[in-house]
Amino acid sequence: MQVVATIAAAALGAGVGMLMPLPTYRLSVAADSDPAGNCPHCQASLPAGLRGWIGHGTCTSCGSPLTSPPWHFVAVTALAFALLGWSLPHRIPAEVLLLAAWLVLTGTGIWLAAIDLHVQRLPTKIITATAAACGLLIAAAALVSDRLGLAATASSAALVLGLAYLTLALLAPGQLGVGDVRLAALCGLLLGTHGWGAVVLGAALPWLLSSIVAGALLSTGRVRRGALIPFGPYLIVGTLLAGIITGLGAAGY
């Protein structure tokens, strides 16, 4: 059953990843700007309607890539989904609902991370929609399992991480953005479903990962000291690692 769930999750992740390139390019714009509507290479207009949002991320006129190669999105999303399908329990309806919430966060989280890497922005609408979807799934899991404390812990964790990041953003203006604060609260919502140990681990890992990467970039001259590095990807990766680690622990691996 574990193998089937892992393979199914990987296949779902690959499908989700295939849908990401074009929306990533179109939303990698400055705040309050309209979505990108032209190819940056030949300036041809992107297709209207749904066709302008679903595709492989290449211009239909000149064939140039609009963003990272599609297989990057497919590989990363499939791997992340597979790890969650393997590590998180899914024996009863409540566990399936929680796994679904984690998959929602993962899919949109990878999308958000890609946008943040391109333009250092985390679109509010995506975070809000993801929070609503995850919140509903967590509430449903709490109801079907008669564990209302699950929803309370998740909500409390979201509040704690959100306030912690808001405090950091106010103390160090320019280092963290409002999008990072919102994303931290969203990550706290999911981490709270695994208990406060997962919240602490998920709060620490992004800073550890960003410190390691920043040190490597500085030592190789890829960035200069004081350069702003998007923090959204580290929040997502740290949260997923914490979820996977604590999920394995709960499953007894």
Image (cartoon, rainbow, N blue to C red):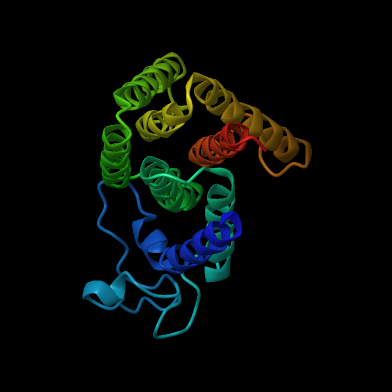
Location of residue 59 by image quarter? bottom left
Residue 45 appears anywhere in the view:
yes
Quadrant holding the N terminus: bottom right
Q: Nearer the viewer, residue 50 or 246?
A: 246
In the visual, does 66 lie left or right of 222?
left
Give the x, y percent position of residue 114. Answer: 48, 52
Location of residue 54 by image quarter? bottom left
Q: Nearer the viewer, residue 146 or 226?
A: 146
Of all residues, the one furthest to the right in this rendering is 219
Q: Is residue 25 above or below residue 217?
A: below
Q: Nearer the viewer, residue 187 or 183?
A: 187
In the visual, does 105 lie left or right of 9?
left
Of all residues, the one furthest to the bottom in this rendering is 61
Q: Is residue 163 above or below residue 180?
A: above
Give the x, y percent position of residue 60. Answer: 39, 84
Count of residue discs: 0
Location of residue 39 by image quarter? bottom left
Q: Residue at x 51, y 43 (%)?
A: 89
Of all residues, the one furthest to the left in this rendering is 49
Give the x, y percent position of residue 66. Answer: 46, 70
Residue 68 appears anywhere in the view:
no
Q: Residue at x 27, y 39 (%)?
A: 140
In the visual, does 20 lie left or right of 72?
left
Give the x, y percent position of residue 224. Answer: 66, 36
Q: Is residue 9 above or below residue 231?
A: below
Quadrant holding the C terminus: top right
